[in-house]
Structure formats: structure tokens, C-alpha cells
Image (cartoon, grey):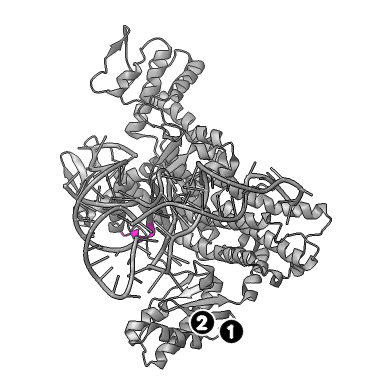
Amino acid sequence: MTARPSKPILRSPMREQLLHKIHDAIRLVLTQWGDTDELPPFTLEVSRQAEHGDFACNAAMLLAKRLKKNPREIAQTLMDALGSADGLIARAEIAGPGFVNLWLSSARWQTLIREILQAGEHYGASKIGAGKKLQVEFVSANPTGPLTLGHGRQAILGDSLARLLAFCGYDVTREYYFNNGGRQMRVLGHSVKARYLELLGKAASPPTEWFEDPENRWQPTHCGLSVVFPSDGYQGEYIVQIARKVLDQHGDAWISEPEDQGFRLVAQEVIFAEIRTTLDRLGIVFDVYYNETTLYEEGKLDAALAALRAQDLAYEADGAVWIRATKLGLDRDRVLVKRTGEPTYLLPDIAYHCEKFRRGFDYVIDVQGADHIEQFPFVRAAVAALGCDAERIELVMHQFVTLTRDGEQVKQSTRRATFVTVDELVEDVGIDVFRFFMVQRKAEGHLDFDLDLAKSSEWSKNPAIYLQYAYARTYGIERKAAEIQRAMPTLDEIDATRLELPEEIELLKKLAEFPDLVLQAARAREPHHLAYFLRDLAGLWHPYHQDGKHHRILSEDVGLTNARIGLALAVRTVLANGLRLLGVSTPERM
RNA sequence: GCCCCGGUGGCUUAGAUGGAUAAAGCACCUGCCUUCUAAGCAGGGGAUCGCAGGUUCGAGUCCUGCCCGGGGCGCCA
């Protein structure tokens, strides 16, 4: 799905600087060989292995064919042209087929600590989205029942994405779109009324086995009473509770109340309140709850339909109104307004997305489950036809969640209401673990929620806890320092050049990667990269913290101690910023 | 039948614009608590990156075909 507009290449300041130098050097080399064409699309990558330096550039290999020269020969020329790049580069080396490996001067890495500590909670933030209004629409579940794991994943994914984009300077609006009309809601009201009548003894409850094959085994009566529960009704226990609530408040006075009136409204109100409580508990706050009925009230549907008709993109057939999607390059037409006169979901969706742009959003991101994927091209094509810049609507699609317990997959069924809810799972594993698990995999892949791992009695197995403990350990250092009456250093007392151990340089390199990582994750709309980055950082920090045999953070050497405390504080800052973007809490003690 | 997403050690997964010896966690095996919280650390075994072709200096990554799993192809949302 290429639902994403092309974006400018974005780099962190440090890398940008180096990139410029290399750019100039390549230009110089080309001039030397009498080539004035454009530069090749070379890369400057963070080296995977320490022996390959800090960065590796592949420009020489790309130029080999063009200049008809040996790539290693070109690499040498390039290195000569590059020199020390104003003191940025400590060492350069030709390697393999023609890579130029670069070692940055240690002073550059080490002063990084000062940058991080000065920026604090802003380290890694950028301004690429400054002045741009961006909307993330997610969850958007109609109030027919509690949020399930699929919704939960979408909630965490959308919220983390919103946090990430806000961190990059966008003016982010979190929006929840819902409708409280339509067939689903009628079925909901019907289900509640049926349970209400059952509670009053006026109707029979259908036996559970009937639900397994509603076509054949559904009978009009059971145990001498009529069955009023719809075969496609909502079977969850929460429906019975809502019915009981009606009974408590109104007694049998609602027997003749239409299911589409009072019952539907009560159900909607109760369920929506619960959804909002769930979201609230997860730390997710929506800026806008947008009800589809607003579109009707403001005449947006009629306007959209009229606009489509004006372009001959809508026509009547079989008593319904269709969109001529085939004219927009899609494989078939679809119904906009049913024979009953009621619009399908498609028409309001089109009107809604036009409305998003009218409301001034520069970018619109729809987070949706894989089951809604088919829909997106139609909305996008129609919105484009109506004159909106549909390139600015992006789709972030996610697959579903499976649950593994005791090594086996837990069967979930909406029909039989045997699904696990977000509330139940959060109750089980806690918010932090829930959030981390839901965001740690890339969205377009399936997510297997390993309950055994998530609630393991040995918390050491749990990656979310692992990160939090890494963070808490930075406070452990601070507490220990206070205990031995060692004052925490001020910024000026931290001489970062004292950090020379390989494991310290590794940590610094990791810390330096963070801004680039944030940009990468933001522009790819993939918050899961944060989870992996944090795991890596914690995986360097824990051993460093633990290895008191080779180096201690708090030692007799005051200068070295201050430098290492500075490193600890920098690690804390980056862990905190990363965890905050994922919505995972940062305990100072565990 | 058509469309979308996946297929990477036993399991769950990272692998941005193609780059050097494919990376983690869990599980398994062996060590480490007079320590800055062992909620941790050190080390070990374990992968023909679904299959077959192609593109090129180079493919887990790009192209084509096929196989397997999931989702969709409603006048449901």
C-alpha cells in the first residue's frame, strides 16, 4: 500500500554536517575526473560493526562504473578530498570493495553528553513539523461493546504515533470518529431490550448452542416463551448488565419502549462511558470525538453527493445511488446510498475526509485495522476527485492481535463474546506492559501477545520492565552518590573527554543515534523502532552499570566519576524521552 | 478467482534509501550476589532469511512466478 506521500530527506544536525562535507568532497573528486553530472545517490550509514568505524560511505563504489576506475582508487581520492572535515573526522579507511569507513573524533562524541543534558526532555525532538497541523484518527470504534485487543493495539499505535509526531513539532490532533446510528446500533438496542424482557420473564434466552449455527437452529420459542433475542445480537455479558440497569431504574415500565429509542441510547451511553474510561486508563486523551451525525446535520453528505454527481461520478441503479469508482481507476463501483435511502458508510467517510481538510489539517493519518483496508482507496479517490489533496491522507494499517497463554493461542470470537477485552488484559499485566507489548511490533505484521511473558513472575523476562529498570538504575547511582555524600556534578563539572572505555563509546554512539531514530520512526510512521532502540540502549546500559569489576561509576577519581555520572544522566534522559513517546512510565525506583 | 499484509534459529520478532561475518528476546546449557537494587551480568549451542528464477560489483531487502498463513472482495462499519 503506497498510501504515503513522499517526504523530504531528514537528518540530524551532526549527520547533516558530515553529509555536507562528504557531498563537497565527492563534488571535488568528480571535478578532478572531469565529470560535472549530478552526484550519485550515495549513503552514509551508521556502521554495524565497531571495526567499520562510526559511519560508512558507499560513494566510491557507485562511482566506479561511471568513472571507469577501480572503486578503491576512487575511495582514496575521496578520502584525500575529505581530509579531516574541519576536525570532525579522526580517521578514515578504505575497506572491502570500496567502502570509506569514518571514525569521528572522540571529542565530538564525548561532548554529546553536554548536548543531551542541556536539551533534556527535548533531546531528539525536531521542528520538521513546525507550523503544520496534523490529525491522527484512530480507535473510532462505534459504541457497541468494550474495546477488544484489536482496538487496544490501534489505540496504543495511534497514541504513540501522535506522541512521536508531536515530538517532531507537528500540531497534532487526536481524533475519534464514531456513529451512533445505523444497523449495528439498532441491533445493539434490540439486544438490550431482549435481555430486559428476559430478565422480566417475558422472553426466553436462546441457548448458547443456537448461536453456533444461527441459520438453522434458531427457533421462535424456547421453554414455552418466545425468543426475542436477535440471532446476530450482541451476546456479551455487558448487554445483560445494561438491561439490568434499565430494569433497576425503570422497572417494567419500558416493556413497550422501542428498542431503537431508549434502549439504544442507554446502551450507547453506558458503553461509550466505558470506552472512554478504558482509554483514559491507558493514558490516551482524544482532542476531538467526531460524531458522524454532525455531517448529516451540517449537510455535508448532500454536498459531497452533489459534488460527485456534478462530475458524473454518481449514478442511480437498482434503486440505489452508486459511485462511479471505475472512472477513478478502481476495480468496481460501490453503493453510496442504499435503496432504503440510508447512506452506506462510504458516503459519510468521503464527506468526513473532505471536512478534515476544510478544518485546516495539512496532513491526515488514518489508523485502521486490516479489515478496513479495502475501503481506503475508494475514499481517497473520491476525495481527490472532489478537489482535495488526497496525497495528504495517509493510511497506517495494522494487523490483528492474537493472544498466547500457556504456550497456546487463545481462541477469540466476537459472535460468542469470548473475546478478551483491553480492560481485562490491562488488569492482568498493567498499563506499562500492555502499552509496550502493543507497540513493539511493526503495525502491518500480526502481533502475538504472549501473556506468559507479559505477566511472568520472573519480571526479568519482561522487556517493558527491563527498560524501566534500566531507567531506575540511573537513579540508583544518584541515591548511592548521596549516600556516600558525593554531590552530583554540575554541567561544567562534567568533563566528557574522560570517557574512553569502549563500552562508554558504545553507549555514547547509541545516545547520538536517538535523534535520527526518532526522525526515521516519525517519517515512516513506525513507532515500533523506538521499542527496539530502547531495548538496545538498555542492553548496553545494564552491563555497564553492573560491571563493577572493570570500572565503577562512583570511584575515588572525582573527575572520572563526574564524567560517568554525566553519562548516566544522559542515558536517563534518552530512556525517559523514548519511554515517554511510548507512553510507558518512568519509575525512579523499582 | 481477484486485491492487501506477512513467511528470518525450537517460539516471538528487528533488519530506513540494496552493502561488509543476518540482529535481539524467550526457551535450552554453563558460570556470577561481601558489588552502584541479581527485576541484573558473562559465556555457549542453534538460520540453506518460504521455494525457484531474474536485475548487478553486491539481494533478507528490488522484479517475475509459485507455495503456505492471515485479512478482505456487502445496499455491514
Callout 2 amino acid: Lys
Left/right placement of residue A109 relative to residue A184 reads: right
Q: Residues within 10 Å of mark 2 (few under 14, many from 20)?
A: some
Q: Earlier in the sequence, mark 2 or mark 1?
A: 2
**Observer able to see residue A324:** no
Front residue of A299/A39: it is: A39
Left/right placement of residue A252 relative to residue A182 reads: right
Q: Quadrant of the C terminus of chain A?
A: top right
Residue furthest toward the right? A485
- Residue at point 60%, 82% (across, down): A87
Q: Classify A279 as above or below A579.
A: above
Q: Classify A77 as above or below A288.
A: below
Could you say where residue A151 lies in the image, as x and y percent from the top left?
Answer: 44, 40
Residue A392 falls inside the magenta stretch:
yes
Front residue of A124/B19: it is: B19
Residue furthest toward the top? A224
Residue A127 falls inside the magenta stretch:
no
What SS does tag 2 mark? helix
Callout 1 amino acid: Asp
Q: Which residue is mark 2?
A: A21
Q: Which residue is mark 1?
A: A86
Q: Are the residues flagged by discs 2 and 1 in contact, CB closer than 8 Å? A: yes
Question: Which mark is on residue A26?
Answer: none
Q: Classify A445 as above or below A146.
A: below
Task: Report how many numbered discs are placed on residues in the image.
Answer: 2
Could you say where residue A42 lies in the image, as x and y percent from the top left?
Answer: 41, 76
Q: Which residues are magenta?
A: A387-393
The picture quadrant where one finds residue A393 is: bottom left
- Residue at point 82%, 58% (across, down): A486
Between the C-alphas of marks 2 and 1, the distance is 9 Å
